[in-house]
Amino acid sequence: MTINEKLATIQTKFKSKKSRFNSFGKYYFRSAEDILEATKPFLKELGITVTISEKIVDNFSDKLPPMIESKATISDGENAIHATAIVGVDLNQKGMQTPQQFGSASSYGKKYALGNLFLIDDTQDSDAANTHGKAPKAKTKSTITSKKDPAYEKAVQYIIAGGKLEAIKKKYNLSAEVEGMLNTL
């Protein structure tokens, strides 16, 4: 069985429920640890290993937050397939010290790199849709006004992954400053 066939086996049989609960946002989610736990039965069965590596990405801009690239790898000892995710570190996150800010970004990066590798469909992911108890506004586009806006981070990740600024502008109103920063990516 090739590495591609082994990965396809995991992608089609993978099951990991959203068993963790965020009491603040009142939603269930799965963590990187949950995803890794769900892959363990496949390791011996398919003769593979799954690893995650991380590195700080130089974004060449003092206007953007530090970025962490997480790379999830599946290997059979001879061949490997990788998937990556890039997340920003929110250094302005209240109530967190710097190591916690990097740890939080690292956890998200690992989760999304694994999700990319195993094709975990989180279209109904509460992380993306969470309003933290506030009702969403009816049929209006959100406006991204600064890099502190949570949607800014998603826009950066989207562009780094090959997405187009025009697609973001269809979904969000952008301040001139934000549009300029995204345009430099």
Image: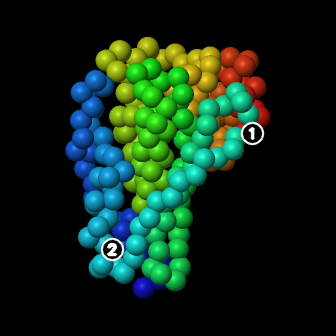
Q: Does dot 2 land on a helix, a strand or a loop?
A: helix
Pinpoint residue 37: horizontal percent, then vertical percent.
28, 59
Q: Amino acid at mark 2?
A: Leu
Percent position of residue 72, x then y: 48, 60
Q: Residues within 10 Å of mark 1 (few under 14, many from 20)?
A: few
Q: Which residue is nearer to you in this view: 69 or 125?
A: 69
Q: How far across and how far down the image is residue 169, in percent?
A: 65, 27
Residue 172 vs residue 147, the one in the foreground: 147
Give the residue drawn at x 27%, y 31%. Answer: 22
Q: Against 20, is 36 above or below?
A: below
Q: Is residue 168 above or below residue 5?
A: above
Q: Position of residue 97 (x, y in %)?
A: 45, 28
Residue ranking furthest to the bottom: 1
Circle on res. 60:
1
Please name the colour scheme applied to the rendered image: rainbow
Q: Nearer the viewer, mark 2 or mark 1?
A: 1
Mark 1 is on which residue type? Phe
Q: Residue at x 70, y 40 (%)?
A: 59
User: Callout 2: 10 Å neighbours few (<14), some, many (20+)?
Assistant: some
Q: Nearer the viewer, residue 58 or 140?
A: 58
Quadrant holding the C terminus: top right
First along the sequence among labels 2 and 1: 2
Residue at (40% x, 30% y) in the render: 129
Residue 136: name its quadrant. top left
Q: Which residue is mark 2?
A: 43
Residue 121 visible in this rendered orientation of the protein? no
Asked whether the viewer can see residue 17, the reply is: yes
